[in-house]
Amino acid sequence: MNESSGKFSLLPRGGRDTVFLILSLLVAFVVWLLTNLSNDYSAVVSVPVVAQCNIDGHSARSSNRAVVTARCRTDGFHLLRFRSRGERKSLVVELDRSDLRYGGGDTYYISGSAKNNYAGRFFGDETVVEAFVTDTLSFIFPAENHKKVPVAPSISVNYRPQYMGASALKIKPDSVTVYGEASRLDVLDYVSTAHLGLWDVHEPVHGTLKLNSVKGVRFSVAEVSYEVDATRFVELRSRVPVEVWNVPAGHHVQVLPPTAEVVLRCSFPVGRDPLPQFKLYIDYKDFNASLSGRCVPRTLRLPSGVLDYRLEPEVFDCIEDNG
């Protein structure tokens, strides 16, 4: 160990020069490497892909993997990432059902220009695909136990005064495909949604509802959309005679009481008076099939602008008099 200016040096001068040279070379190499990796290159790269898709009656994920190969332009960092992928875990890519073609059995494939829709998912948005080398990607989606069941929405609607639903609640889709063991599917008759309470509704409302999960069962969709309509209404009241239609010749049926108090709920504002077009009748077949002679009157169809109606009374006594 040499002494210089009252201080000790751990390395002789020649050793210090060697360390400095090595560090300089290392820094130069790193700079060179980063510079080269930052440049764009064109190369053929391959990515193993497992497909995921919602196909009725089949598993949501393919049981096999397909290797997609293309000539790509990207920087050296991403090329290095592709090279190091090797046999590692496959890339899971969600495919649109409309892009898949049926290949027989449980096989579905994607080919041609449809692959271009997934270039970014296969190779990353930072990579430009110059040309696909792989023409067709085939995937096997094994069949599963399944059946279609209706959706039972849980929605309570409270309308603002003088407002009501202009149409029935709309659910889309109104049924879903469920997958699972046969024993579980046998006892599953419907799928319910999370509860939703709507208050002071006075205009159309729409949104989504999540499906309530069922243990051991998979759904084709996780949520459904709903639409609740609303319109302002006014009420019109009148007394309307209750007629009997399709009475055979020689028969006579008397209705008690002969008229009904009718309340029509009409869209606001009311145009043409709908009361003259509103008819109430009891079909003789309904009366003949009744054991008690008590019948509920019908109406052919609601006049334009009428949303709903109610009667007082709701049930009428019918008496046949053939004398």
Image (tube, grey):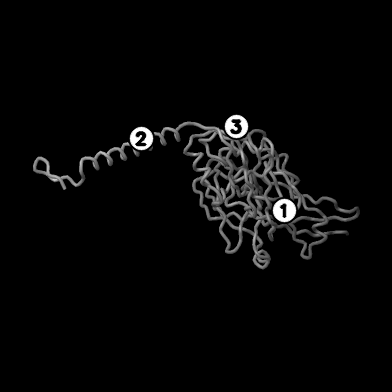
Q: Which class describes the residues within 10 Å of circle 1: few (<14), some (14-19), or many (20+)?
A: some
**Secondary element at tag 1:** loop
Q: Residues within 10 Å of mark 3 (few under 14, many from 20)?
A: few
Q: Which of the 4 image quadrants contains residue 30? A: top left
Q: Nearer the viewer, mark 1 or mark 2?
A: 2
Q: Pinpoint residue 217: horizontal percent, then vertical percent.
A: 61, 61
The answer to whether residue 55 is left or right of residue 28 is right
Q: CA distance from mark 1 to mark 3?
A: 31 Å
Which label was assigned to residue 130? 3
* Residue marked by disc 2: 28
Task: Indicate left or right for 313 with 210 as reference.
Answer: right
Using the image as rendered, state which of residue 24 and residue 209 is in the foreground.
24
Residue appearing at x 77%, y 58% in the figure: 318
Residue 3 location (% of width, % of height): 12, 44
Residue 249: x and y in percent read 91, 53
Which one is earlier in the sequence, the residue at label 1 or at label 2? 2
Q: Looking at the image, which residue sits at the far bottom?
A: 183
> Do the residues under discs 1 and 3 have CB atoms within 8 angstroms?
no
In front of the other: 151 or 154: 151
CB within 8 Å, label 3 to label 2: no
Instruction: Please give the name of the residue rendered at 55% of the width and 40% of the height, measured from the top-left corner.
Output: 123
**What amino acid is found at the position of numbered circle 3 in the picture?**
Glu
Return the residue at label 1: 106
In this rendering, would 148 be left or right of 199?
right
Residue type for callout 1: Asp
Q: Secondary structure at mark 2?
A: helix
Q: CA distance from mark 3 to mark 2?
A: 33 Å
**Which is in the foreground here, disc 1 or disc 3?**
3
